[in-house]
Image (cartoon, rainbow, N blue to C red):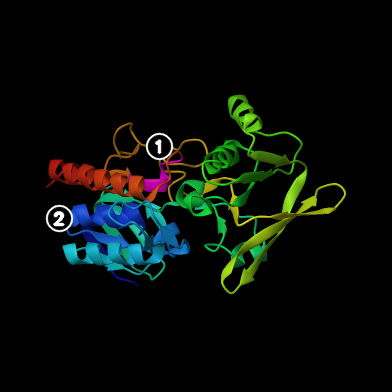
Amino acid sequence: MGETRHSKVLIIGSGPAGYTAAVYAARAMLQPVLVQGIQPGGQLTITTEVENWPGDSMVMGPDLMVRMEEHARAMGTEIVSDHVMALDLAQRPFRASGDSGTTYTADALILATGAQARWLGLPSETAFQGFGVSACATCDGFFYRGREVVVVGGGNTAVEEALFLTNFATKVTLIHRRDSLRAEKIMQERLFANPKIEVLWNHVLDQVVGEDDPKGVTGVKARHVETGAITEIPCAGVFIAIGHDPASALVKDQLKMREGGYVWVEPGTTRTSVPGVFAAGDLTDDHYRQAVTSAGMGCMAALDAEKFVAEHAA
């Protein structure tokens, strides 16, 4: 049998929300334990340049997460390389079962497991992730000033990304597999009225084309869903906008959820439907999905947890 370890505050997840929560919880002398999960650092570890993190005109995503981890450690957080496989929120102390065999118990729990962008699963898409293939126009659109880009999708996310990218790109081609969009009508009207946007109907992304030295995207091949005919589109960037999946499987039957599998929190707080359990970052935020807003929510979660622990001290 593995060991059982108790802490006042257990943090699950190691993106901006988790590490910021760790910094604040440690400063509150709560001696937090943070379990990193299978992707330490979260989604920023698969990005390259980050230009919208306050205080850094440009920082590499993986480097930023290394700095956050070091900061959390320096404040006194114990960081564990483990993956939580199961949670029991039925009673306090809460119990988390790690893949290592360790059982973690805690008086308060901060969930910061994040979300993952949905990808198409194409080998060429994977090959150029971070080198012209992105799932976040707000994060990476700035890099495509004066260039042509492609957006894949047909819902609100895709239309919003396409419209945002017109602030930088000379042309945006929206590739959609159907002959009509799923986005809200007002969003569609804005899209169709924008002279920079062209829609390629009844097509799916077949291949991302690029070069290796230097590594970057040069275009895409789109396939007609009925005829199979291939259309080649030159572009410097490809934005996959087919939605995100929050990493909420651990708690989907134990916490109140919102549409899309996002964890519900009481407005203006990080409190979930179970007292003592707090959620921060992309796990609960389907709107902003930015590193800086996730970090802010991590701060809120630690402060909420500090208050809870103080009120329920034995």
Identify which residue is drawn at 29% across, 36% down.
Answer: 269
Place of residue 138 in the rendered image (x, y in percent of width and height, measured from the top left): 47, 46
> Callout 1, which amino acid?
Trp
Q: Amino acid at mark 2?
A: Arg
Instruction: Answer with left or right where residue 3 lies relative to residue 161.
Output: left
The residue sitting at 52% across, 40% down in the picture is: 164
**Position of residue 273 measured from the top left corner of the image (x, y, whole percent):** 35, 36
2 or 1: tag closer to the N-terminus: 2
Tell me where the magenta segment starts and ends, as one range.
279-286
Side of 148 relative to 70 (left or right): right
- Label 2 CA crowd tier, 10 Å (few <14, some 14–19, many 20+): some
- The label shown at residue 264 is 1
Q: Residues within 10 Å of mark 1 (few under 14, many from 20)?
A: many
Q: Which is nearer the eye, 92 or 228?
A: 228
Identify the residue under disc 2. 27
Q: Residue at (51%, 36%) from the top-left corner? A: 259
Q: Position of residue 208 (x, y in %)?
A: 67, 61
Kindly state the secondary structure of the residue where label 2 is placed. helix
Residue 140 shown left or right of residue 91 in the figure: right
